[in-house]
Amino acid sequence: MRSPLSALLLLSLLQLAGSDVTGEEVGRKPNIVLMMVDDLGIGDIGCYGNDTIRTPNIDRLASEGVKLTQHIAAAPLCTPSRAAFMTGRYALRSGMGSTGRVQVLLFVAGSGGLPPSETTFAKRLQQQGYTTGLVGKWHLGVNCEDRGDHCHHPNQHGFSYFYGLPFTLFNDCLPGEDSDVLADLQHTLRNLTMLLGVGLFTLVCVRVCGLLDVGLWLLVALFFLAILATGVWYMPFKLLSTWNCIIMRNQEVIEQPMTVETLPRRLLVEAQNFIKRNVDHPFLLLFSLAHMHTPLFQNPAFAGKSRHGRYGDNLEEVDWMIGEMTETVDSLGLANNTLMYFTSDHGGHLEDTDPRIGQKGGWNGIYKGGKAMGGWEGGIRVPGIFRWPGRLAAGRVVDEPTSLMDLYPTLKHLAKDTQPDRQLDGYNLMPLLEGKVERSEHEFMFHYCGIYLNALRWHPHGSDSIFKVHFFTPNFSPPGAGGCYDTKVCLCHGEHVTHHNPPLLYDLLRDPSESRPLTPDTEPRYAEILEQAAKAAERHRSTLTKVQASDDTHSHPNADAHGVQSQMTWDKILWKPWLQPCCGTFPFCGCKEDTTGI
């Protein structure tokens, strides 16, 4: 018969063992699934007020988690917004802000991109033992000096696995669509080539007919000039689908040009398989969808099913894909230890229309403006949904200002990463998401058009108001329009903007559509607000480098005082054949992925 002392000792050991197991389960770092849609308008989603497009799976995420109503992108365009999202810092801190016409990367074979010196949340989590993956769109560069260095590639920025588009989906990927890339320059180069050809032919005829003594050297010079002009026009632009529309698995090109029709299914399967491969240890997956950027997909399973034409069909396909991702997480028993996040990189593209199929860009609800329109709310206010059963209260709504840049410090916190970091512009969202605090740490947020400080918002302590100050605004065209329909995207410099003195001032709490500017007669704190905004802008500029803060691109066009090189200059954006990723022998690039079984 056992003594009471032995029984007590056995019980203590069992309790100790049980506490160890429990501690291990509780202490396991959470999985992270981030889902980012391209060019999605906040007004497109049911849980954000749309009652004509069916998005039950996205709505379910919101009902089972936390919905952010004032979730802000750091820029209204793909490349700078995604750079800020990845790094937790405004894009100009990493040289990803534009000074002129071109505001995003245009070629896979450009040398610009997210600098190797930058740190992404994927790199931080990778250092904390996470398996990290990116499936879908990147659009932050590939190579620097040769086609094999992959200095900007996702693998170099913390993603141990990459499958998808190193560039983006764009019209040139689909035959019959208009070109997205420098269409006016293409037109000019084509006309110049034709003019040289006609001139050369005419001079040859004149010489043969003896009408004029035309030197042979002139004909030879014109011939080589015509060949050069043809090469400059034809090689980079007429073969864009080959150069830009590619799929890579890690650093290998596996399809060139890509088959657009099967892309959504392939991306979804890759994302699901990544989760299935990593159920036994913490993982980070960024599922960066090719939707809703044009060209819009034409999946027969969704074609004609929505009430909003091809755009609505595409959005309902996105919702189905989000549902499949959620089901994958749930069916593997991962839901209670997985943070799922849904968002868009910026607002919908209002100017993107087609007389054949109607509106191709998204709807930004009650908010003014859209993609590439600087700090207007419609271009930067995006969906923000977090779901984590057992950790985040279902159905919670947060109206405080938050940012896509907040993901970086939030993920660092969840990964228990306490190592020192650079200056960040985002904040850990977990206290706000869990309801431990009611107020966002963002007292001020800054809104950029290119590298230019376009607007800021102020959330004063002790007030529910959100004051928005616009220092300048893009000029809409034609006059009276709600966007830049003449140029398709708004520009941020020179004659393309109007500076305001005093700045335009709105209270987003009472006027979220930014339709009624405040005046000294309508707002008692008018002078104080503008004074506080000016001081905040000055403090913010002091955290930037001299060149960035002064917008001076003449004395130091490529680098700032701390060596952060601009990635958006013409010499970095334009196509360089020696940087072109290629399956095969350049320039004879071409291959198709084996999609048997998908």
Image (cartoon, grey):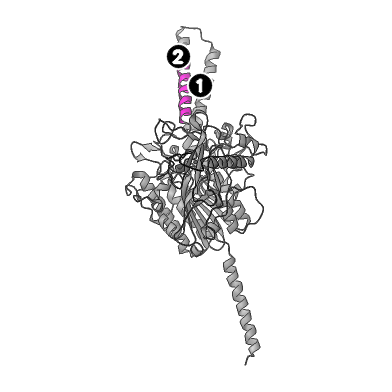
In the depicted view, which residue is nearer to us: 465 or 370?
465
Indicate left or right for 292 with 7 as reference: left
In the depicted view, which residue is nearer to us: 362 or 200?
362
Main secondary structure found in the magenta portion: helix
Tell me if mark 1 has few (under 14), some (14-19) or many (20+) residues whose alpha carbon lies within 10 angstroms of its own. many
Percent coordinates x, y for residue 421 in the rendering: 65, 50
Q: From this viewpoint, is residue 143 visible? A: no
Secondary structure of residue under mark 2: helix
Decide which of tag 2 and tag 1 comes sooner along the chain.
2
Q: Residue at x 55, y 61 (%)?
A: 30
Instruction: Indicate the quadrant where residue 177 lies.
Output: top left
Indicate left or right for 221 with 176 as reference: right
Q: Is residue 573 magenta?
A: no
Instruction: Indicate the quadrant where residue 9 lies.
Output: bottom right
- Reading the image, the residue beneath label 1 is 226
Q: Amino acid at mark 1?
A: Ala
Residue lying at the far bottom of the rendered structure: 1
Q: Quadrant of the N terminus?
A: bottom right
Secondary structure of residue under mark 1: helix
Q: From this viewpoint, is residue 417 visible? A: yes
In the depicted view, which residue is nearer to us: 280 or 255?
280
Percent coordinates x, y for residue 520 in the rendering: 48, 39
- Reading the image, the residue beneath label 2 is 202
Percent coordinates x, y for residue 184 in the rendering: 46, 28
Q: Amino acid at mark 2?
A: Thr
Q: Is residue 198 magenta?
A: yes
Q: Where are the magenta residues, as a range?
A: 183-202
Q: In this rendering, is residue 489 above or below 429?
A: above
